[in-house]
Amino acid sequence: MSGSRYIAAAVVVLLGLWGVGALSATTNAVGKPLPADAAPPAQQVITGLTQPATTLDFFVSVYKRPQNVDGNSWSDVLSTPLVRLDKDFNLVPAAAKSWEASKDGLTWTFHLDRSLTWSDGTPLTADDFVATFRLGADPKQAWDFAWFFSVIKGWDDAVKGTIPVGQIGVRRGADPYTLVVTTTMPAPYLPGMMLYSPPLQAKALAGVGPFYNTDPATSVSSGPYLLQEWTKDQRMVLVANPKYGGVKPSIQQVVLKFADLKTEFQAYQANEVDVAANFSPADLQVIENDPALRAQYHQGFGDFRTYYVGFDTLHQPFDNLKVRQAFSHAIDRAGLIKNVIKQQGIAAYGFLMPGFPGSQNASLQSVQMYNPALAKTLLTEAGYPDGKGFPKLELWLRSERALGQAVGNAIGAMLKQNLGIEVEVSNRETKLFMDELNGHRLQLYMVSYGMDFLDPANMLGIWLSGGRHAWVNLRFDTLVKTASSMVGDPVRRMAMFHDAETLLVTDVGFIPIYFVTPGFMWKPYLKGDALRADKIGVTAWHWPGWDGLSTLHQSVYVNQDVSKYRR
Amino acid sequence: MTSRYLVGRLAGLVVAVVTVSILAFLLMHAVPGGPFDETRSPLPPAAKANILRKYGLDQPLWVQYARYVWHALHGDFGIPYQSPTETVLALIARVWPVTLVLGAIVVSLSFTLGLTLGILGALRHSTWLDTLLTSLATLGMTVPNFVIAIWLIYIFSIRLRWLPTGGWGEARLLIMPAIAYSLQPLAVVARYTRVAVLEALAGDYVRTALAKGLHPAQVVVRHVLRNALIPIVTLLGPMIPDLFTGSIFIEFTFRIPGLGKFFVTSIFQRDYPLIMATVLLVAVLWSLTYLASDVLYVLIDPRVRLGARGR
């Protein structure tokens, strides 16, 4: 054989080896091609820390799922909801390929993706969704999110137990792959609400019961992962689902460690977890002083959470608008951000955070702006010159950690300084606080609310009469209710929400304080489209996190830099 | 005499446990807020009523208590609201062994080291060794265990990377929690032992024994320690049930899946069945510890008789 032949043969052999090598190196255990800079498949593991949980499934319990912070969860990955949220908060089809509303806006038809199956081979059908929604409405189940689906026909009656759950407006359509949802009034936000539709399997529900996903032996998945191990109070291991019909994840194993969230940052520093949130002021100081950690810190907007001061406007002294206005002008939000809240929030002048649909924070800024002189005048006009004769107040906080307590104390100090009113700050535990709030027995409090779905109908809806706040305004009720159910005129609908929020702020139904911008940290070796800047330039671990309701898990992978960190 | 005494004491134990259970039951229901108060929005009253009915919380308190006792006597302590996939007994059977393992290590560490150091300190009274041990003990008693825990994690996990920050299931994961949790009881044991041994050393019988020509080591073991043990048992016995029910700080900080945290989480979550179970567990443990230390007196000191009335 001539030399050139040797060379040609060698090239062929080498090319062959390279081809095999390239192929085997670029797909993970479920056949997902990995990017060129990805670490080997065995390293495609993500480890997180969460509070102890009793279920992964939304319809079993919303608040007992593995959560990280402010609604960011590590759950629902054993299921495929009708729709998911991408990092720009667009609804993207998941189990439903398409959907449409009837002319009267009362009936929604979802067309399911026929290729989706459960991990036991059973097809995912409308019957699974029907069984899941019936479970949610079942009074015996006592679901902790049962209030949410009131707009579905018959839902509230079923929750009360006055009609059987079989009569709620969630049914199979013409075939097993058509789901029909009927509502009590036109609800343009219904597809958005259907983010919360991760189905349980009808067969497993009937055979094992709602907790079938707590044991790998009975667990069945229609989502991107399978349950491999669940050691109570210790850890959970999920592996990529080879039968999943949607976009398969690059990360082939997810390890969740159950622990108190206060230990998250130390575990992150010791390279035991890849992601962290929940930082104490001391942690933030450590991050601030360390350029490497600072580069891993990303400020996001979490679940669009607003902190606000509320009062009992139905009784003295806060039934007097001038008193409420005086309070609203006595609080210096800019000062709070500069001195106390720092990178953990931005000043709030309305209820809807910038980035949330319908937000008009900038244009509301003048309504309750900081003006201590005006505040004093208003209080005098209300009959309490220099705070004389004003009852001593207690500002209740809901189980706040260091930052919330500092904000509460700062507000108390501002009211004392600017109005001469004594305010004692008292941090109460959650159950007691909510019992008193929902019973309209709190005179003055600071609390927060984060959105459930991306529509002003949700955030403003909690201010309707008869909700958790002791503030009543019939015009506001009419505006929000009308706009919520308005179909076909989105511009007018949004204008009505603007009017309603303006009314809420000018009537001082509450005093907005700040919008939470929670920080997330992730190791530099985590890459992927979901972790790059979104359309408004925010690089965040977008809500709802590593969750079946989000597309976050679809693009994230571990790159080769991981070898510098993991032991 | 002894058996009659023990029967009487056990009957007292039952009375104590019943009293504690009634008090705990009334107190937990008296605290405002219930296990199913919505954390987001108010539930419709009818829906809330359904939930209360499901858990029997719609009944009058005395009915609820009677039902609880009836079921408990049949071995059914209910289902914890915070972990509805298991029973209260299964939960305790799962998490208590974790706490017991750590507790056993802490008790053996703190008592063997504490007794040894206390005796050494007393025998080398007023020397540099005694001063050193006393200062260390003072430090151990005053620095809270979670502060020690955080420093251990900072040094050995974050800086040196020798040990994981926490977890359970490997022997090396026990090192830092055992140290952090032992220091305080160790210091207490050492301090009390030193004082008790010093007092015993000053006794006439010690001088007599030495005068008879007994070897000083024999004197210490036979006379000094035996007499010093009585105050030690009285003071230190009650530390043991505490150590065997776990520390919430240690368990939280080192991610240990033990019983300690449930004492706190059950209260915050108004997890009535688990509140009752943990309270009863502590009541029984304390009663048994006091009984055990009374019995120990007899074994240590022949002058003490069980049930003997004062003359």
Image (cartoon, coloured by chain):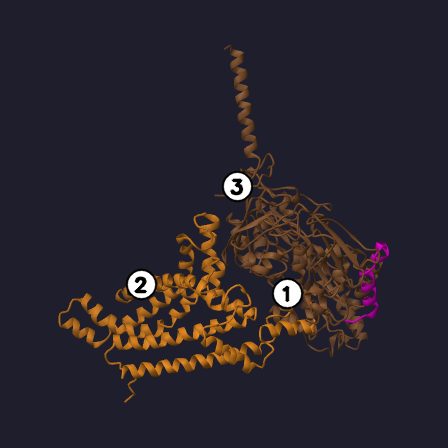
Chain colours: A brown, B orange
Using the rendered image, report if marks 2 and 1 lie on a common chain.
no
Q: Which-is-in-front pick, marks 3 and 1?
A: 1
Q: Secondary structure at mark 2?
A: helix
Q: Which label was assigned to residue A546?
A: none
Residue B85: % across, % down: 53, 63
* A422 or A459, nearer to the observer: A459
What residue appears at the point 22 percent right and 68 percent down from the top-left corner?
A: B221
Distance CA(mark 2)–CA(mark 1): 52 Å
What residue appears at the point 27 percent right and 84 percent down from the top-left corner?
A: B1
- According to the image, label 2 marks what residue? B112
Using the rendered image, report if marks 3 and 1 lie on a common chain.
yes
- Decide whether residue A483 is among the magenta residues: yes
Q: Which label was assigned to residue A143?
A: 1
Q: Are marks 2 and 1 in contact (CB under 8 Å)?
A: no
- Please give the chain letter of the residue carrying mark 1: A
Graded by Cα atoms within 10 Å as few (under 14), some (14 to 19) or many (20 or more), the crowding at tag 1 reads many
Q: Are marks 3 and 1 in contact (CB under 8 Å)?
A: no
Q: Is residue A492 left or right of residue B49?
A: right
Residue B96: % across, % down: 43, 64
Looking at the image, is A533 positioned above or below residue A191? above
Q: Which-is-in-front pick, marks 3 and 2?
A: 3
- According to the image, label 3 marks what residue? A43
Task: Please state the extent of the stretch shown in magenta in the rendering.
Answer: A471-493
Amino acid type at circle 2 is Thr
